[in-house]
Image: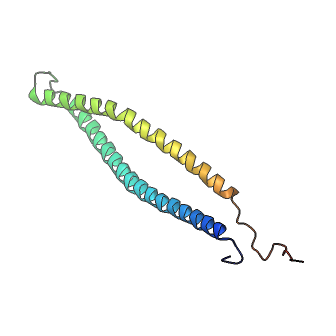
Amino acid sequence: MTGGGQTPDFEKALALSVQHYREQLVVLHRIARALDDWGDQLVELARQWQDCAAAARLSDEHLLGTGGDFAAHHPMQQKRAALISQILELNKALSPRLQTAMALTVHELREMRGGRTALHGYKSPPSSKSRPSRSKA
């Protein structure tokens, strides 16, 4: 027997349990880093996109105020219309992907919460000091 009168099977099982929890912790740290990187990058890109959209709105307001001719035959108007069309197409293409990513994130968070709830249910076994001793009579 090893470690305070425990059987070798217990020691192996305990070591394996510790290994699995250690692996979980390593993976959770990786997830945290990935979320931090992805989250920071995504937040920054969303801010940049909002800034660009706000600047476009302001320039369109100014453009409308100039009283210029918005004829479709003007080369810059054609370029502007093509850019707006590309933005709308890309936005339409990205929207389902972002919704899917958000849904997966919500699902993963629920699973992690469930795992955390399950972990709260685990209790360390009472120490050998608190167990009644078995006498060999």
Q: Where is residue 133, by image quadrant?
A: bottom right
Res 79 seen here: yes
Q: Residue at x 64, y 57 (%)?
A: 119
Q: Residue at x 14, y 24 (%)?
A: 69
Seen from the viewer's position, the closer of residues 46 and 135 is: 135
Name the quadrant of the C terminus: bottom right
Q: How is the image coloured?
A: rainbow
Judge left or right: residue 94 versus residue 16: left
Q: Residue at x 65, y 52 (%)?
A: 117
Above-or-below relation of 98 to 3: above
Res 66 seen here: no
Query: Farthest residue toward the front?
Result: 137
Q: Position of residue 36 (x, y in %)?
A: 41, 57
Seen from the viewer's position, the closer of residues 47 and 119 is: 119
Q: Position of residue 68 (x, y in %)?
A: 15, 27
Seen from the viewer's position, the closer of residues 32 and 76 is: 32
Q: How many marks?
A: 0
Q: Residue at x 46, y 58 (%)?
A: 32
Q: Position of residue 131 (x, y in %)?
A: 81, 72
Judge left or right: residue 58 versus residue 16: left
Q: Where is residue 94, by image quadrant?
A: top left
Above-or-below relation of 60 to 32: above
Q: Position of residue 3 (x, y in %)?
A: 66, 77
Name the quadrant of the N terminus: bottom right
Above-or-below relation of 126 to 108: below
Judge left or right: residue 122 versus residue 40: right
